[in-house]
Amino acid sequence: MNATTRTDVSRTHFVLVPGFGGFDALGSLQYYHGVTEALRSWKGVAYDAPLTLHYFPNVPTAAIETRARLLLDWLLQQYKRGILRLSRGDTLHLIGHSTGGMDIRWMMKLLHDHAVKNEPIEDLRAELFIKSIASAQFLSTPHRGSNLAHMFSRWSGELQLLATVLYETSRALRQPGSRFLASSIKRLGWSAGWVDALLDTMSLLGSFDEKDGLARARARASYFDTLKWLHDASEDLGAVADLDPVRHAEGALHAEIFRTTYAHVRRRSIVTRAEPHPGAPDWDLFKICHRWTAYNPGVELGPDCSVRRLDAAGSVALGRAHNDGIVNSVSMVWPTLEESVFVDADHADIIGHYGNSDAPNEDVVNPEHDYRRYGLFMSTSGFDRERFLNVWRSVRDFALASESSRDSRAPSSRGVLQVFSSRRTDSEAGAAADSAPSSRAEAGAPSSIRGAQGAIS
């Protein structure tokens, strides 16, 4: 029996969590495009344990606590099905893009809370999950929120109404209504890849009329997946409020949990930055978002800093206005400067949607579905296939390097986990207060801290 079929060999699991608006695959668009091939292409000599990749199909725009609880429940289901064999030494490597990184942090906090209260998750001890986590990596994650979310928060009602209109139109008119919406957006003149992705997805609905049963089945799946995505977005936009920087005061609390309960977990943040393409029209979506993200950023996003480059070519100075089109770069630095690295990339480059959408789709060979790579944003990052592969090889190597010393660093008992209790000391409370935003921060903590799910103020 070989290593990939033996049941007594511990397995390594990479869990990739999508960000705001996230999904696994929607129409012709994969969220993490080409990542499977990039992670599996490595032929390591020192590592021969089976590697399993998981793409968590998150809800698109729900509050962070809701998304974190769904992630924890999803992991529990994998355990019940025998996919995650935690008692046999399987290891978990958590990787989150954008808001997906926040989902991971809050999921780990939920596990911590269960452990210190000695509360099992159904019939499973939280410590078993905690000990299995070997690394956590955050890609373009708004650890202290995004100024773009602060701008959008005042229009949360209008955004939810727009999502509702799109859902009801697509539901009532089915594929003709979806095609009409797509063509209407195209007439606006936006030329970024996200429009192409939308049009390609809607074109799949034309297969409803084909005689081939498989084509019709795929068309129905694309239609209902898209419909569900729109419905979820119309029902809960809590993530917009949660990502407003004025609501983020939990940084010191989470950092303390990572220093104690998760001292055995290697963590790293990948920081990104990009500028709009000079030839982009003023109404280009990326250009608009970049401008709003850079406009009058608050001190709560974090201090100006200098972050070392992933390619080891020195470091990059970052100010609060610098961003990747969606998230302010200084907000991505967490928990420390030493645990953060910089990559020239826009917010979508890092997950495989870079460059020219019409270029050869060399990243993915998938005989079951014609997924495409889209340059979702028009930016000057210069991100290409070589950089993409280097980033994800780095992600993979960082994760696997954590396994050799995991056993010596992992908590040995619940007593170790309780070093940091749910009641903070006066000094810890003071540290949290020091990190809390002043000026614009009067609005309070995220809905996940307040105990409300999906709350929008």
Image (tube, rainbow, N blue to C red):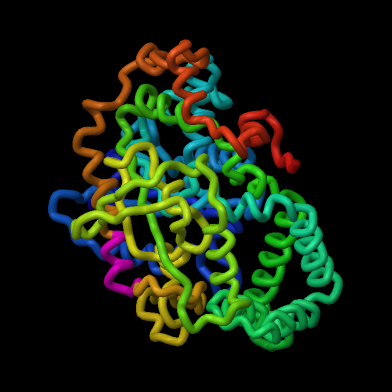
127 is higher (above) or lower (below) than 394:
above
Q: Residue 439: name its quadrant.
A: top right
Residue that lies at the very extreme toward the right in this rendered image: 172
- Residue at 25% across / 33% down in the picture? 406
Residue in the picture at 29% in, 66% down:
389
Which residue is at 65% across, 49% downward? 240
Q: Residue furthest left?
A: 45
All told, the count of numbered labels is 0
Q: Main secondary structure of the magenta part?
A: helix
Residue 16 visible in the shown view: no
Q: Is residue 293 left or right of residue 322?
A: right
Instruction: Work out whether residue 331 or residue 388 is closer to the camera in this orientation and state it.
Output: 331
What's the magenta region?
Answer: 383-392
122 in relation to 369, above or below: above
Q: Is residue 40 visible?
A: yes
Residue 109 image offset from top left, x and y in percent: 50, 30
Look at 49% across and 51% down and name the residue there. Answer: 17
291 relative to 406, above or below: below
